[in-house]
Image: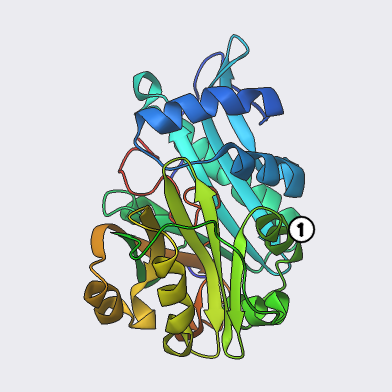
Amino acid sequence: MERLFPPPVPRKEANLEIAPFKKEDAAVFLVHACAEGWLCEPWEIDFLLNAFPSGCLTARKGGVPFAFVTAVSYGCHGWIGNLLVHPAERGRGVGLTLMQRALAELRKVRTETVWLTASAAGRPLYERLGFREIDTVRRWVGAGCGNARTLQGQGDVPVLPADRLGWGEPRTQLVDAITARAVVYSGPAGFLMAQPAAGYIQIGPWAGDSLRQTFHLFDKLLSHLGKKRVVLDSPAGNDIEGDLRMRNFYATSSASLMFRGERPEYRPHTSVPWAASEAWGEVASIYSDKELR
């Protein structure tokens, strides 16, 4: 792919070690992620370390991790996220080094399209790395209604075909991992997953022939939640903003959805593909401008 600008070159940092992201590093990462105000659950990191360990990396000094990135590959597509550098170490090109290493790992498995989300401050550097904007992702927050009850899945429509319709690639590992911990609502037109988290419910993935045809599943879920907080990350291109506002949801932040490589067949009207609050680059780390300083 042609570059409009030369790729940025990270500065060499003395005593810097790029090393695999180990399971024992997860606790350190989660502390830093919490300090940044991210929503991130431990299971997300466990999934990534098992699904694509070579793309999950840390930067260390004296053996202590202070910066992190994760990547995951689904067939021809991949995501990069969780790019986080300790505040005291920013401005030295460490985030860029991790980013380039993660991209290299995705190239090794012949990934054709790499996705991420970017803040306004981070976007220019991602563009220099060859990424282009395709949409905007907004984080929506609302609450349930009706009487709180124990969530129980409804319907028996196969999830994987509908998820593949929206995503464009089979995400069997991820969908299986989510299904094991989520409540699934499904109907003839598609499905919606509700994931219990610490103090809120995360919606996603949510997919169907048309999201508007599956809003009855969303309403059914809300009616079961009482006043519990609900979080949803949704691309602007699916045009459900009015429907969400009618249900008293409000946008709290936004990010550019970007890709690099082969232009994907993008179908935002069929899917809210994000399956986690922060973990896959799908809205990860990128609600601040701190990832590449």
Q: Residue 113: horizontal and vertical position, in percent?
A: 60, 68
Q: In this view, does 228 lie to the left or right of 266?
A: left
Q: Is residue 293 left or right of residue 3?
A: left
Q: Is residue 64 left or right of residue 253?
A: right
Residue shown at 63% from the left, 41% from the top:
43
Q: Can residue 100 be seen in this view?
A: yes
Give the SS element for disc 1: loop
Q: Residue 268: horizontal and vertical position, in percent?
A: 45, 80
Q: In this view, does 263 lie to the left or right of 250?
A: right
Indicate whether 223 appears above or below 10. below
Q: Mark 1, residues whose alpha carbon is within 10 Å: few (<14), some, or many (≥20)?
A: few
Q: Which amino acid does label 1 sit on?
A: Val
Residue shown at 48% from the left, 48% from the top:
278
Q: Residue 87: horizontal and vertical position, in percent?
A: 35, 24
Q: Nearer the viewer, residue 171 or 75?
A: 171
Mark 1, residue position: 109
Indicate whether 96 appears above or below 140. above
**What quarter of the picture does the N terminus occupy?**
bottom right
Residue shown at 40% from the left, 67% from the top:
222
